[in-house]
Image (cartoon, rainbow, N blue to C red):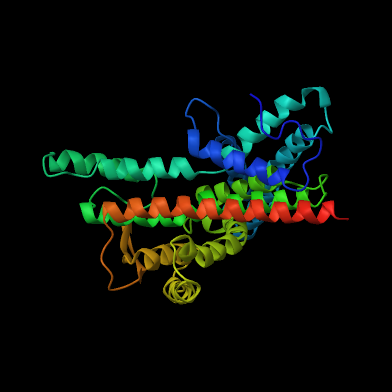
Amino acid sequence: MTLPFSGVDSFTGIHPFLLVIAAASLDRLVGDPRWCLHPVVVMGWWINRLRRLAERLAGERPWALRLAGAVITVLLVGSSGAAGWLLEQWALGKVLPDTRPIALTLLLLALASALAGRSLEQAVRAVLRALPSPESAQSEALSASRTALSWIVGRDTRELSSPEIVRAAAETASENAVDGLFAPLFWMLLGALIWAVGYQAAPGPLALAWGFKAASTLDSMLGYRQGLLRWLGTAGARLDDLLVWLPCRLVALTLPLAAGLGPQRSWALLQSARRDGAPDPSPNAGLSQAIYAHVLQIQLGGTNRYGDQCKRKPLLAAGCSPPTATTVQAMLRLSQRLELLWLVVGLGLGWVVATVAGTQ
C-alpha cells in the first residue's frame, strides 16, 4: 500500500490533517471488518477482567469501588493512549525507521478503527431495512427489526411497535453520531494540530483518539447507575462526559450549517436544542439528539423501557412530526455532510499552519 503522505519526513503543517482525512475516508469505505480484531474489543476484554478483580477486592464498599473504578480508568485510558503514542512514534520514524512504511499503514488502520461512521450507518440501516413493508409478514419483519435494533440500543426492544423502532433508530443515530464519530474525530483533529505546529513528541491523533475510545468503552460497559456499577463506573462515566462535552457542543453549533441553514437560523436552533436537551440526565446525549431533532424538524424523546423500568425522556422539538425511515436516512446523510465540513475546516487549518510556518 502506498500512502499519499508516506514520503514526508515530518508530519507538520498540512500532513497530519491529510492523515486524518485518509483515515476518515478508509472508515467510510470499509467500516469495521468483522474478521479483524478491533481495538475496542481488546479494551472491553481488559475492562471485564479488571472489573471482576475490582469487585472481588472491593466487595460492596462504595468508597473502595469508587477507588477501584478510578484506578481502572487511569490504567485503561493511560495504556490505550500510550499504545497509540508508541505506534505514532514508530510511524514518525523515531523507532525502527527501516520499517516506517509498515508503521504508517498500521497507523492509518488504527485511526480508521477509532471512527464509527460507516458501522453506525450500517447498523441503523439494517434496522430500517427490516421494518415491515405492505407486502411483508408484519410479525416476522417486526421481530427482525427489533433484533437488529437490540444490537445498538440499551432499551428493551421486545414489544416495540414500528413507529417506536424508528424513533429508537433516530435517537441512537443522533446520539452515537457524537459518541462514535464526531468526538473521536475532534480528538484526532486536535492531535493533528499538535503535530502540525511541530510538537511531534507529544500525543498525536491516535493517542488522543484511543484515549477517548477507552473512556467511551468504559462508560458503555460500566456506566450504569445500578448495582455495584453505581460506584465502580463513576470515574469512567464522568471522564467520558468531560471528553464528549466540547465535541458535542461543536456538533450542535455546526450541524445547522451543514444542513445549509444561515447563521441566524442556526443560532436559534442551537438555543432551542440547549433548552430541550437540558432536562436529560446526560450532559451530552440530550443536546446531541435535540439538535438533530430541531434541524430535521422531528419529535424525539418519550418513554423507554429498560428491563422492568420505564424512563421518560424529555420531548425534543415537541409538536413536530414523528421520525420516519426517510427522515432517519436524512439524518445519516446530514452526519456525512457534517463530517466532511469538519475535515475541510481541519484541512484549512493545516494549510494556515503550513503557510505561517513557511513565512517564518
- With 328 as the anchor, is 217 left or right in this view? right
The tally of labels here is 0
Give coordinates of residue 346: x percent, y percent. 64, 53
From the viewer's perspective, is residue 14 above or below residue 240? Answer: above
Q: Residue furthest right?
A: 360
For the point 34% across and 43% down, the residue is 125
Residue 234 seen in this snapshot: yes
Give coordinates of residue 190: x percent, y percent. 69, 54
Quadrant of the image occupied by residue 136:
top left
For the point 61% across and 46% down, the residue is 214
Q: Residue furthest front?
A: 359
- With 179 as the anchor, is 7 left or right in this view? right
For the point 77% across and 35% down, the residue is 8
Give coordinates of residue 235: x percent, y percent. 62, 57
- With 235 as the anchor, is 227 left or right in this view? left
From the viewer's perspective, is residue 348 above or below residue 86? Answer: below
Quarter holding the C terminus?
A: bottom right
Residue 223 seen in this snapshot: no
For the point 35% across and 55% down, the residue is 170
Quarter holding the N terminus?
A: top right
Give coordinates of residue 322: x percent, y percent. 26, 63
From the viewer's perspective, is residue 270 above or below residue 16? Answer: below
Frontmost residue, 221 versus 350: 350
Quadrant of the image occupied by residue 324:
bottom left
Frontmost residue, 43 versus 328: 328
